[in-house]
Image (tube, rainbow, N blue to C red):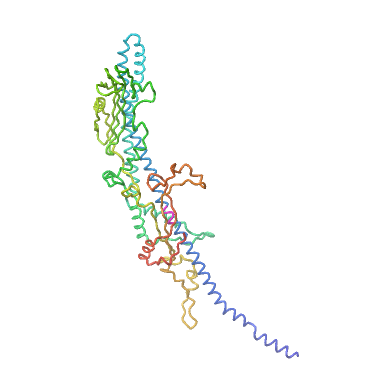
Amino acid sequence: MMKSMHQLRRSADAQRGQVLVWFLAFSVVLALVFAGVYSVGQATSEKQKVVNAADAAAYSGALTQARALNIAAYTNRAVIANEVLIAQAVSLDSWTHYFERATRSYEQEFKALSAIPYVGVVFRALSVIMQAMNKLAQVQEKALDVAVPGLIYAWEGLYAGWYTGVVSPAFAAPVMASASNSAAKTVLAQSVATQDGRSDAAPHMINVAPLWARNEMAWQGFTKLYRKNGSGAGNSGDGRKIAAEMILESRDRFSKERPGSDVAILDSFFGNSSMCIPFTLKVGSEKKGDTRLVNYDRWEAQDTVELKVKMGPTFCSWGKGVVAVPQGWGRAVANQTQTRGTRQSGKAAALAYQDTHQMAGYSGIKSIWDVDRDASGRPRNEELTYAVAVAKGGEGRAGEIRDSHALGFMDREMTGPLGSPDLKPGYENDQIAAIAEARIFFERPVRNSLDITAASLFRADGNKEYASLYNPYWQVRLSSPTATTKALVYSTTGINPALVVFSQ
């Protein structure tokens, strides 16, 4: 019995250490499996980083374009407002000249009538009132004679400096794609993971030149400069038609027409009122005043008032035999050169034409950028897209993808019946790539019961508002890359878009 136990102990001692041999052999397999799992995990993580970076870059590039469109919209609204201001200033200049002339005429007439017994005191009081108003009109007249031409030159310089010097190059010259790419690159440079003071490599843009050209062509085809003697929307041969219509509709009542005064006693002298004694006499005043835009290049404002008298048989209608005596007249014209513009009919109109206040330096309705429109005036497209291609790795960028191959412990080529542990991931072109695209579109907030924050932005009529560069409602959303964009990337880089994942 003792011998058997001793023999068994010796047999166990002889087998000690065999598990270690098996463990060492199996640890190689475990290391390879661990390296493979690590490599797959790192590849998946890096792919998601590239996709996220591509989305952020596309969104940022598109946001640059949307902001440019919104800035242009604000600028166009400022252009419209300043053009309306010029029309108002010219109207006020014309009216002031007319009012100064009319109060002077009435002052002289009432002063002469003040010699009439009994009623002379009334005319004397009216003469004093007209004299006081005339002095105020003279002060305003002198101020406007300096202020209005100065306003015109200031506006012309502002438009030339900002719109022609800053806005137009951003739309006309091929700079918008570069600005968008710059924003996208800035975002990519910041798309890094940092831990314990160490950062991985930032993704980079690929296929830059073809996509730059693609983005710039989309931008150039989306917008258009509507200018003088250029093709316009609708049936207009002048591209300024839409801007001119908006300016004319944006004017207040004073700069459209000035028929008279809302004060009854003043309307008797500066408006359209009359007094009639049937079959004997009819006396009244006739006020005319309006501001016209001629050929989109000239503002003409004219104001006149005439004293009309008809004596003899009358049924309180003017008809024939009316004697019209001009009491006040004024006219102001703003255009490129000092011209009087178009003469209107009538005695007072003839006097106003002779005394036209001519203001040079006004170049007419300004050229304005807007979305490209069809013959009906509607936009041909209401959105455009911006696309980028992003990658990690590639030629000259070894080690950017932190997998087991980059660490070097699986890059061991061997020959033999057992095969090789060299498990290269085999990325296409040795890089992980992603394509991202974002759309820039126009959408005004629509009234609904869920959104109460944008109440001031809703249209009162609730109708759809078409895209334009007159309202700043340009937004950005990510979208799936189009087949055209994928084909462009594939044809110029050899990257198969079907293998590139886009996460919307």
Using the image, determine if residue 136 lies above or below residue 9.
above
Q: Pick out the residue farthest to the right.
A: 1
| Residue at 59%, 79% in the rendered image | 23
Q: Nearer the viewer, residue 241 or 56?
A: 241
Return the residue nearer the eye: 43 or 374. Answer: 374
Expressed as whole percent of the image width and height from the top left, the position of residue 105 reads 30, 19
Res. 145 visible in picture: no
- Classify the position of the N terminus by image quarter: bottom right
61 falls in the magenta region:
yes
The residue nearer to you, when weighing 166 against 473, is: 473
Residue at horizontal 33%, vertical 8%?
117
Name which quarter of the figure residue 352 lies in. top left
Rendering coords of residue 220 (x, y %): 33, 52
Q: Residue at x 27, y 18 (%)?
A: 313
Is there any visible trace of residue 345 in the rendered image? yes
**Magenta segment:** 57-62
- Looking at the rendered structure, the number of numbered marks drawn on it comes to 0
Left or right, residue 366 beside residue 409 = left
| Residue 41 x, y percent position in the rendering | 52, 67
Left or right of residue 181: residue 351: left
Q: Please tell me in which quadrant of the rendered image residue 311 appears.
A: top left
Vertical arrangement, residue 482 with respect to residue 273, above or below: below
Residue 495 position within the rendered picture, expressed as x and y whole percent measured from the top left: 39, 66
- The stretch drawn in magenta includes residue 234: no
In depth, the one of 108 and 117 nearer the eye is 117
User: In this picture, is 145 found above or below 368?
Assistant: above
Secondary structure, magenta segment, majority class: helix
